[in-house]
Image (cartoon, grey):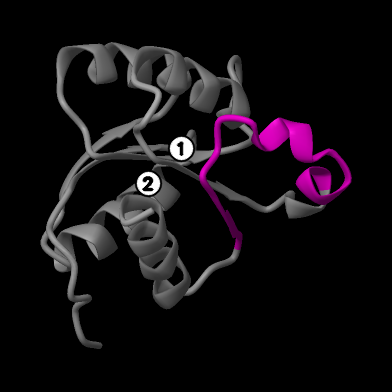
Amino acid sequence: MSKPHFPRKKILVVDDEPSVYETVKMLLEFDGHEVVTADNADDALTLFDQGRFDLVITDYTMPGMKGDELALAVKARLPGLPVIMITAHAEIFKSNPTLLAGVDRLVSKPFHLADLRDAIQKAVTR
């Protein structure tokens, strides 16, 4: 498995399932990124407000605030920051694309590392 050829980023990963955010963190750290995790949107926004991130990767289905709402909250704070949403419910977005208003890239679960790398590269080089 070769590493991608784009600059390292500081990435905030948000998912309510520890096994998911730990796996994504491990994969991204393998690629040389600095990764901070949160298990809900409220904690993610607190971390976001305290630090500087190059990218946010969020799950869609979380208790409380959903990933699309988190994306809009991130964009309200920093409009140009890329947001990637990972979801097992991609069909929701195909039938209602307005839910993607704050999302730059969508990655369907289950995903391969190559899918995530491609989404990151496209989101940060747009």
Residue 77 image offset from top left, x and y in percent = 36, 13
Relative to the observer, which residue lies in front, 34 or 72? 72
Farthest residue, direction bottom: 1
Tell whether 43 sits left or right of 35.
right
Residue at which label 2 appears: 21
Tell whether 111 sits left or right of 34.
right
Range of magenta residues = 92-109
Quarter residue 81 falls in: top left
Tags 2 and 1 in contact by the CB under 8 Å rule?
yes
Name which residue lies at 27% across and 52% down. 25
Tell whether 105 sits left or right of 2.
right
Residue at which label 1 appears: 15
Does label 2 or label 1 sit earlier along the sequence?
1
User: Under tag 1, what secondary structure?
Assistant: loop
Marker disc for residue 94: none
Relative to the observer, which residue lies in front, 13 or 78? 78
Name which residue lies at 21% across and 33% down. 53
What's the CA distance linking mark 2 and mark 1? 6 Å
Relative to the observer, which residue lies in front, 81 or 23? 81
Can residue 104 be found in the magenta stretch? yes
Name which residue lies at 25% across and 88% down. 1
Is 118 placed above or below 80 here?
A: below
Is 26 placed above or below 84 here?
A: below
- Graded by Cα atoms within 10 Å as few (under 14), some (14 to 19) or many (20 or more), the crowding at tag 2 reads many
Residue 47 image offset from top left, x and y in percent = 24, 18
Residue 32 image offset from top left, x and y in percent = 11, 62
Residue 102 image offset from top left, x and y in percent = 56, 30
Is 125 placed above or below 61 here?
A: below
User: Under tag 2, what secondary structure?
Assistant: helix
Q: Amino acid at mark 1?
A: Asp
Q: Amino acid at mark 2?
A: Tyr
